[in-house]
């Protein structure tokens, strides 16, 4: 019984140990001094998905990895890199999943084509059912 309780306690404590005790990255929660560069960084951060939270952008997530990604975006924007090249680098590093607007590729083509196909099929079904009623 004691072992079972200890095991349950361990499973409850594991999520608390998910983040490290390291301080946040330099620009994780600090805006850039130049408002134009910060606006570019913020716009890019809104387009990037947090890989830990998955439902939030890195701009909205409080996960440690999202903070690291925010810092990376701000550091590269401050260095003069374009948002498009940063986005391309992140997609290359983390895959298409990191962006809310994945580029067209063999892997993502079904995501882009499926809605059109479903609309066409739905239109055909609706057309046939209307003809039968007449």
Image (cartoon, rainbow, N blue to C red):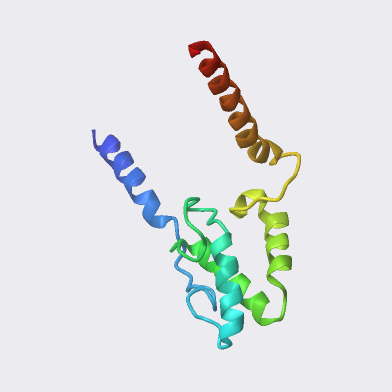
Residue located 41% across and 56% down the image = 17
Relative vertical location of residue 126 with respect to residue 26 in this rendering, above or below: above
Residue located 64% across and 39% down the image = 111
In the foreground, 115 or 52: 115
Residue at the left extreme of this rendering: 1
Q: Position of residue 118 (x, y in %)?
A: 60, 30
**Which quadrant of the structure image shows residue 121?**
top right
Residue at the bottom extreme of this rendering: 33
Q: Position of residue 2 (x, y in %)?
A: 24, 37
Relative vertical location of residue 45 with respect to residue 10 in this rendering, above or below: below
Q: Position of residue 93 (x, y in %)?
A: 70, 56
Q: Position of residue 20 (x, y in %)?
A: 47, 63
**Residue 69 in view:** no
How many numbered callouts? 0
Residue located 72% across and 75% down the image = 81
Residue located 51% across and 73% down the image = 28
**Residue 53 in view:** yes
Q: Is residue 71 left or right of residue 23?
A: right
Residue at the front extreme of this rendering: 134
In the foreground, 131 or 8: 131
**Which quadrant of the structure image shows residue 113?**
top right
Give the quadrant of the N terminus.
top left
In the foreground, 48 or 13: 48
């Amino acid at each position: 019984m004691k072992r079972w309780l200890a095991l349950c306690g361990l499973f409850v404590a594991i999520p608390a140990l998910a983040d490290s005790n390291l301080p946040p990255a330099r620009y994780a929660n600090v805006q850039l001094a130049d408002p134009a560069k910060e606006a570019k960084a913020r716009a890019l951060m809104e387009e990037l998905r947090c890989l830990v939270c998955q439902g939030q952008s890195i701009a909205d997530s409080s996960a440690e990895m999202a903070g690291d990604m925010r810092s990376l975006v701000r550091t590269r924007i401050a260095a003069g890199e374009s948002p498009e090249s940063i986005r391309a680098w992140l997609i290359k590093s983390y895959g298409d999943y990191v962006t809310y607007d994945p580029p067209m590729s063999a892997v993502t083509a079904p995501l882009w084509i499926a809605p059109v196909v479903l609309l066409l099929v739905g239109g055909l079904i609706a057309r046939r059912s209307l003809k039968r009623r007449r």
